[in-house]
Image: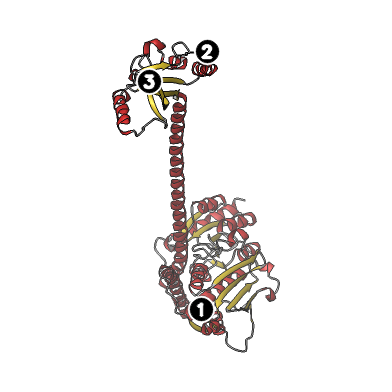
Amino acid sequence: MKHSEDVNRTADPTPAGRVLVVDDDPDIVANLCDILKDLGYHADAATSPCQAIQLVVENDYDVALLDYKMPKLDGAALCEQIGQRRPAIVPIMITAYADADGIDRADKAGVWRVISKPVNLKDLIPLIEQATRNSKLCRSQR
Amino acid sequence: MHSFRSDSSSKKTDLLSAIMVSAVDSIIVIDRSGTIRNVNPATERLFGFVADEIIGSNIKILMPPPFRGEHDGYLSRYHETGKPQIIGIGREVMGRRKDGTDFPIHLAVSEFQVDGETHYAGIVRDISDLKRTQEELQQLNEVLESRVQERTEELRKAQSDLVDKEKLAMLGRVSGGIAHEIRNPLNALKTSAYFLLNASAATPEKVTEHLQRIDRQVDVIESVVTALSDVARLPQPEQVPCDLRLILDNAIASVSNLSGIQMDLTELAKPVMVQADPNQLLIVFRNLIRNARDAILAKEPRRQNTAEDQRITIRLAFAKDRTAVSIADTGIGIESDQLEKILAPFFSTKARGMGLGLAISNTMVQRNGGTIRVSSQPGQGSILTVDLVSADSETRR
């Protein structure tokens, strides 16, 4: 594995995290899923908020990567919906452009981190690892 | 009256005398040299003199400068030229009381002869109140005028603030839109590059897939830049007779992701010719069909029962020298409050959209002598009608 040195993969060797990737651009979800799978994660792709909710109902995840701007339901609203169904999922928002109101709404919806597009994977991957640990910790304490 | 000469007990004289005594206005009689010969009680009240103090004095005693110095001149000029300056006319001048205070008066002078001697009778009315009122009115007018100017200035400023604010808001929307439209493909590019550089188990198929994705996303950025430069300098149309049917077919073919949508286009036996720039019409119809597709795809899946519900209907209508193309979709529709903004640049109802497609299309159609009309039922769909100049009628002219 020749992933970046700064990615500390020894902290939580097992089991691999489960990540839901939501973006209305199919190329973006496919890319993130490819990268995560290559790192050993289980990754599912959703290209609409509807599909995302359906997947959350059917499967459990540790982390959800959510695009902010999507038709019908934005990332903040989707985050609330996911939180109601599976509160242990740690939501990370990925946004190309969000105004102050958008950031505020994401905060209120319980988003753990907001990162901007284009994403720097050297930043995102450690965040996903930490989020996975947080999620598993949250479950073990229940 | 005391010093007014009354020769007899004739009733006429009594009457004149009574008028003189009771008059509200001051009446002053002078002779040719300006010497006061008679005054009435109103004169005493007005100027503060007792009649005996002024009878025999020159009328100048009742005038402040500059009238005082000029009065002799007035009289002699009149005697020389016979041209009246005040006699029979009346004007506003200043009077001076015994105590030295001045006040505005209206003076009317008449000329008459008694025993072959010329006299002048002046009727003097105090117009202090009138003048004061006039001045107040004038001041009020000035205040009003300056208030109007203030308010106008405030309004102008508010208007210009509003324009600035609107411009800023527009700039915000534009930069937000552009940021979003470009960062998304950049995100895809960056993640593909990361995968290609770092993936431990990248099969040749995966590598190809990512390279194709990179290629595709570069096209997306290219199209954003093209749309922006289209706005920057919309080319002047080159209007020629062109076949609408051909353009519609090409437009439909150029729109991707139409597979799940039923395309209903009237079969036509012969070409339908319109007078327009075919390249611009292709852009217009491509934009409209793409919008129709997006409106349909934006509908929640549960609200689309069958493929029947996903339909774009294109119809042609002819009236006089016009040809109308209507594009109806079964999409999400447009809320009534957004309908009026829908043709404006940088306004979009899509999650992903800079709001340039319809604005550019509208401008292009207008430059080709046409119009775009929009009607919509929220939740049911929209109809966009492009009205164009028929080519046949154009050639007939």
Q: Are marks 1 and 2 on the same chain?
A: yes
Q: Residue at x 50, y 71 (%)?
A: B366
Identity of the amino acid at label 2?
Answer: Ser
Identity of the amino acid at label 3?
Answer: Ile
Identity of the amino acid at label 1?
Answer: Leu
Q: Nearer the viewer, residue B390 or B160?
A: B390
Q: Which mark is residue B30?
A: 3
In this rendering, position of residue B86 left or right of residue B77: right
Res B126 → quadrant:
top left
Say which label, 3 or 2, has the lower sequence index.
2
Q: Residue at x 68, y 73 (%)?
A: B309
Neighbourhood count class around disc 3 (C-alpha, 10 Å): few under 14, some 14–19, many 20 upward: many
- Asked if one can make out residue B256 in the rendered structure from this viewpoint, the answer is no
The residue at which mark 1 appears reads as B282
Q: Residue at x 53, y 71 (%)?
A: A26
- Measured as percent of width and height from the top left, residue B25 is found at 47, 21
The residue at which mark 2 appears reads as B9
Neighbourhood count class around disc 1 (C-alpha, 10 Å): few under 14, some 14–19, many 20 upward: many
In this rendering, position of residue B255 left or right of residue B108: right
Q: CA distance from mark 1 to mark 3?
A: 100 Å
Q: CA distance from mark 1 to mark 2?
A: 113 Å
The chain carrying label 1 is B
Task: In the displayed orientation, state which residue is furthest to the bottom.
Answer: B269
- Measured as percent of width and height from the top left, residue B249 is found at 56, 83
